[in-house]
Structures are given as structure tokens and as C-alpha cells.
């Protein structure tokens, strides 16, 4: 199937970018390092396995007249842009709830249909050669400017130009579709539209198997830091497999004192009890987080949030969290001098957080309890969102929080922090 002008332009700019990178010694050395990393079987084997898995499904689809050689270009594009990216980001499966369900449902979103329609007709090669880098530059400006208050005018201009370009392309596609409806309304068009949907759903079992295997291997490796007794390790390994039963998020989160507890269990039944206790505690913390997140969504002071509860307007978020992190690091480092946390830490730092990107009047508030055993600090960003950090025990104890209002007391003293450091609602850190 011959390449269209959009694909030719994309290959041209990709090649130009590749040549530019190869001419830069530091970038070239980084690329060589990445290629060496991919030379390891643990890295390339999953990709080869995915390619073989997809090939089998394509062979089956060919027998059922659902795939034909005219879909080669779309299949290759899908494998590089979707399947490979999904495999590279496999760690998300162990962090995000209902990850596989969301990936499957994402293929049915309206944006998928719009994206497909927008690619039914392409512009001339000169137009594509000009538009592709222009759109990339405008999108980059919009993303970068979103994090800097002083660049909001540039972001608005970039967004407006992107909207105009998108509208112009959409009008062109609609007009061409209506003019060539007889060419568009074919079985091949329907097959091309369905291709990324059924291929994505088809590879989810493979992605799940790789994800759970990787999660268990990482957890098994952590256990080996707690004991070198092979019987204890096997007992702990099998207890994790038996009780957690392939739940990637549970397996990945198994850590802290639970690793030592399960590796020290004298029997398989005891090891299973330890894992069950971990599972019960984790469920309780998840319920608490869901409850507090629901309350946060109903709070009129809360800004626009994504599906994970993260704020959409993230101005000053990075600068604020870096400054608070630095303050916490200094508190932990100077704890032993007084046998407690220092109330004068801001003065010791000269109230200077310019290296973290904050202005001279940074607005960080810090309080320390009279016994010097607890402290907390917070800052309200330009968006009105508050970040806080604190401790109620000796280092390395650390609690994080973010929300529409700051805590009024230290961790353990104000319930807004949550019941424990890892149960706090800090979605935006």
C-alpha cells in the first residue's frame, strides 16, 4: 500500500530529527546507551513476544477476512504508536486502578472516531511538510507555557492557532468526505477504523501477563534483601502468589515492614496470614482515599480535576513541591543537632527558595510544636491550591498533603493528613 503525503512528511521529519540527533555527540551517546540497554534479552524479549502475539492475531483475522494487506500501513503505525508505547509504560498497570478496563474503553472514545476521520483525507505534501512541524511547535509551546504564569499569553496564542489549524483541517476533511462519499463508504474504510480497536483489546491479555510477571519479580527481588534462607523465600513467594492472585497493584505495593514480616514467617499459613493482613490494610486505605477524594470533588473550592484526582491547572506546583521537599530534607538533616525539628529553619535557609523557582516573597508557612517532635509547612500556589509537608516522628518520617485548604495542625493532629503517610490524599505531588 503506497504511503500518503502525511506519512511521507512524517517520515521526512523523523529522518531529519534522527540526522540532527546523530550529529550531536551528547545525544548520539545517549541513543547508543539506549540501544545497548535494548540489547539485553530482558528488554527486547517482551517486544519480540508482543510482535509474535500480534502476528498470530493478524493471521487469524486474515482467515476471517477482517485483515488484508491494504491494512499493513495502519497496522505498523498502531504497533509503533500504541502497542509498543503500552508495553513501555507497563508500569502504569500497577499504579492506576482499572488500568486495562480504561485502555479498552479508550478505544471507543469519540476522539478515536474524530482522529480516524481527520486522517481520511490528507493535504498535499508541501502543506504537510509545513504543517507538521508547525503543529508540533505550537503544541510544545502550549505545554511548556502551561507551567509558567508569565507565559500564559503565549499559551493562549498557541492554543488559538492550534484551534484555527484544527478547524481548517476539519473543514477540509468534511468537504472532501462529502465530495467523495462513494469512495469513503466502503468495507475497507470500516476495517481500517476497527483495526486499532480490536488489536488493542487483543493485546491486553499479553500486556497483563507481562505486567504481573514483572510485578512479582520486583517484589521477589525485594524479599531477598530481608533473608537469604531459600525455604523462607519460597514460602513467602508462594504466599504472595496464592493470596494476591495476580493483582498487579497489590503485588507492586507490597513493601515496607511487610517484606520483613512475610520473610520471617515460620510456616506457609503464617506467611499467608501476613499477606492477608497487608491486603486488608491496603483495602482500608483505598476506601479512605476514595471517600476523601469524593469529598474533595464535591468541594466548590476544588478546581478542575482529571480522572485520577489531579488538578488540571498546575501552575507553580513543581516549584512549590520542590521547595517543600528541600525544606523537609533540611529539617531531617538538622534533627540531631537539637534532638528535634528546628523552628528557625526558614531563617537558616535565608528564606530563599529561588533555586526551586519561587519568588523572594515565597509564602511558605512553617510551624513546629513546642516539644520539637512535630512540624509542618505549607504554601498556597497562584491557583489557590495548597501543598503541605510535615512529620510527627523522627526522620525519615514524612507526610504529604495537597488540597483547597492547608492543614491546621501537624500530621496526627489534624485528620486532614490522613491516618498514615501512605494513606494521605496527596494526588498532585
Image (cartoon, grey):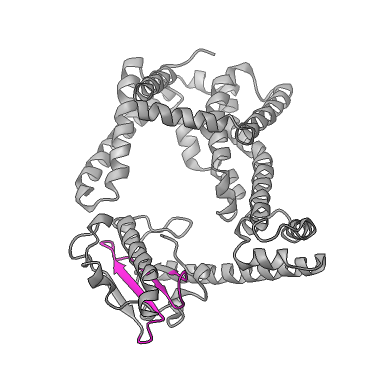
Name the one closer to the observer, 215 or 289: 215
Q: Residue farthest to the bottom?
A: 370
The percent position of residue 143, horizontal first and vertical second, equals 32, 43
Q: Residue at x 46, y 80 (%)?
A: 412
Q: Is residue 50 left or right of residue 370?
A: right
User: Residue 340 falls in which quadrant of the image?
Assistant: bottom left
Residue 300 appears in the figure = no
Q: Residue at x 44, y 76 (%)?
A: 416
The percent position of residue 366, horizontal first and vertical second, equals 30, 75
Name the one closer to the observer, 179 or 76: 76
Q: Residue at x 51, y 18 (%)?
A: 183
Q: Is residue 218 above or below residue 72?
A: below
Q: Residue farthest to the left?
A: 360
The part of the chain drawn in magenta is 370-399
User: Residue 401 falls in which quadrant of the image?
Assistant: bottom left
In reply to whether residue 420 is colored magenta, the answer given is: no
Q: What is the quadrant of the C terminus in the image?
A: bottom left
Q: Residue at x 64, y 59 (%)?
A: 250
Amino acid at each position: 500500500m503506497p504511503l500518503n503525503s502525511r506519512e511521507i512528511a512524517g517520515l521526512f521529519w523523523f529522518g531529519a530529527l534522527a540526522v540532527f540527533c546523530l550529529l550531536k555527540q551528547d545525544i548520539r551517546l545517549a541513543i547508543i546507551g539506549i540501544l545497548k540497554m535494548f540489547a539485553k534479552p530482558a528488554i527486547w524479549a517482551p517486544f519480540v513476544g508482543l510482535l509474535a502475539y500480534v502476528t498470530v492475531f493478524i493471521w487469524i483475522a486474515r482467515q476471517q477476512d477482517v485483515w488484508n494487506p491494504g491494512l499493513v500501513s495502519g497496522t505498523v503505525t498502531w504497533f509503533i504508536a500504541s502497542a509498543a508505547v503500552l508495553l513501555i509504560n507497563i508500569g502504569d498497570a500497577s499504579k492506576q486502578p482499572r488500568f486495562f478496563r480504561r485502555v479498552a474503553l479508550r478505544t471507543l472514545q469519540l476522539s478515536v472516531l474524530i482522529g480516524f476521520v481527520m486522517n481520511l483525507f490528507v493535504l498535499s505534501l508541501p502543506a504537510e511538510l509545513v504543517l507538521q512541524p508547525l503543529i508540533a511547535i505550537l503544541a510544545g509551546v502550549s505545554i511548556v507555557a502551561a507551567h509558567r504564569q508569565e507565559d500564559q499569553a503565549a499559551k493562549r496564542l498557541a492554543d488559538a492557532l492550534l484551534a484555527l489549524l484544527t478547524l481548517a483541517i476539519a473543514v477540509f476533511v468534511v468537504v472532501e468526505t462529502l465530495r467523495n462519499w462513494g469512495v469513503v463508504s466502503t468495507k475497507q474504510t470500516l476495517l481500517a477504523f476497527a483495526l486499532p480497536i480490536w488489536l488493542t483489546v487483543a493485546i491486553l491479555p499479553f500486556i497483563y501477563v507481562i505486567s504481573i510477571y514483572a510485578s512479582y519479580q520486583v517484589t521477589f527481588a525485594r524479599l531477598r534483601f530481608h533473608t537469604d534462607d531459600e525455604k523462607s523465600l519460597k514460602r513467602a513467594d508462594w504466599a504472595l502468589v496464592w493470596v494476591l492472585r495476580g493483582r498487579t497493584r497489590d503485588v507492586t505495593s507490597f513493601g515496607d515492614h511487610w517484606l520483613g514480616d512475610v520473610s520471617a514467617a515460620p510456616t506457609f499459613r503464617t506467611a499467608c496470614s501476613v499477606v492477608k493482613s497487608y491486603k486488608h490494610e491496603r483495602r482500608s486505605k483505598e476506601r479512605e482515599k476514595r471517600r476523601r477524594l469524593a469529598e474533595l470533588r464535591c468541594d466548590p473550592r476544588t478546581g478542575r480535576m482529571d480522572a485520577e484526582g489531579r488538578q488540571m491547572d498546575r501552575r507553580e506546583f513543581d516549584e512549590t513541591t520542590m521547595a517543600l521537599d528541600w525544606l523537609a530534607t533540611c529539617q531531617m538533616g538538622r534533627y540531631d543537632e537539637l534532638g528535634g525539628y528546628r523552628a528557625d529553619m526558614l531563617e537558616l535557609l535565608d528564606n530563599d527558595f529561588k533555586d526551586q523557582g519561587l519568588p523572594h516573597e515565597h509564602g511558605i508557612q512553617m510551624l513546629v510544636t513546642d516539644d520539637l517532635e512535630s512540624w509542618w509547612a505549607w504554601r498556597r500556589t497562584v491557583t489557590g491550591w495548597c501543598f503541605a509537608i510535615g512529620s510527627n516522628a523522627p526522620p525519615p518520617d514524612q507526610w504529604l498533603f495537597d488540597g483547597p485548604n492547608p492543614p491546621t495542625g501537624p500530621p496526627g493532629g489534624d485528620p486532614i493528613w490522613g491516618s498514615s503517610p501512605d494513606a494521605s490524599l496527596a494526588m498532585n505531588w
